[in-house]
Image (cartoon, helix red, strand yellow):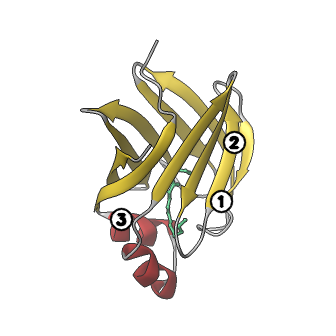
Amino acid sequence: MPVSLCGTWDMVSNVNFEEFMIALGIGLYTRKIALKLKLRKVIEQVGDRYVVKTISTFRNYTFSFRVNEEFQEFTKGLDDRHCKSLVDWEGNKLMCIQKGEKKNRGWRHWIEDDKLHLELHCEDQICKQVFKRVI
Ligand code: VLZ
């Protein structure tokens, strides 16, 4: 069993976020605000259902899924697109493929050195975020 991703996590680093947001087509105004945010991730699991919350002083984004069960995702408040998303384990990494208008879109979450790691990708850009445990 992979290590649980559940908990409350605060951002400690965020590499290439701006280029990633540009790849998503997020406008200048939102990008400038988003770049200054210290995002918080809250990950909860009940049975095989996960809830992932990305929380900030500016906007929040919450979505929910079951592993290996495709769902319709609307990235409300991010780039406001509809995707067909599928989350599955890839070894110790929880990975998501977000099929839609944007090519090569998705993310991976995993635990390494007691930190929560997140790699977000879109087109040719990869953003790498690391979070430390709060609770
Ligand atoms: O994380 O998608 O945990 O899908 C844009 C931020 C991209 C704009 C952030 C500012 C993407 C709004 C984070 C802040 C809420 C993300 C995934 C994996 C969940």
Q: Residue at x 54, y 47 (%)?
A: 42
Q: Position of residue 22 (x, y in %)?
A: 43, 72
Q: Position of residue 49 (x, y in %)?
A: 70, 29
**Residue corresponding to mark 1:** 75
Whether residue 65 is situated above or below residue 101 in the rendered picture: above
**Residue corresponding to mark 2:** 64
Whether residue 69 is situated above or below residue 126 in the rendered picture: above
Q: Secondary structure at mark 3?
A: helix
Whether residue 57 is situated above or below residue 132 in the rendered picture: below
Residue 116 visible? The answer is yes
Residue at far top of view: 1
**Cβ of mark 3 under 8 A from ligand 1:** yes
Which label lies toward us, 3 or 2?
A: 2
Circle nearer the N terminus (3, 2) = 3
Circle nearer the N terminus (2, 1) = 2
Q: Mark 1 and 3 residues: CB-CB less than 8 Å, in contact? A: no
Q: Mark 2 and 1 residues: CB-CB less than 8 Å, in contact? A: no
Circle nearer the N terminus (1, 3) = 3
**Residue corresponding to mark 3:** 17
Q: Residue at x 29, y 33 (%)?
A: 114
The kind of residue tagged 3 is Phe
Whether residue 96 is situated above or below residue 37 in the rendered picture: above
Q: Position of residue 19 (x, y in %)?
A: 35, 68
**Cβ of mark 1 under 8 A from ligand 1:** yes
Q: Residues within 10 Å of mark 2 (few under 14, many from 20)?
A: some
Indicate the quadrant where residue 102 lies. Answer: bottom right
The kind of residue tagged 1 is Thr
* The C terminus, quarter of image: top left
Q: Residue at x 56, y 26 (%)?
A: 88
Q: Position of residue 89 (x, y in %)?
A: 50, 23
- Judge by depth and name the residue closer to the eye, 15 or 42: 42
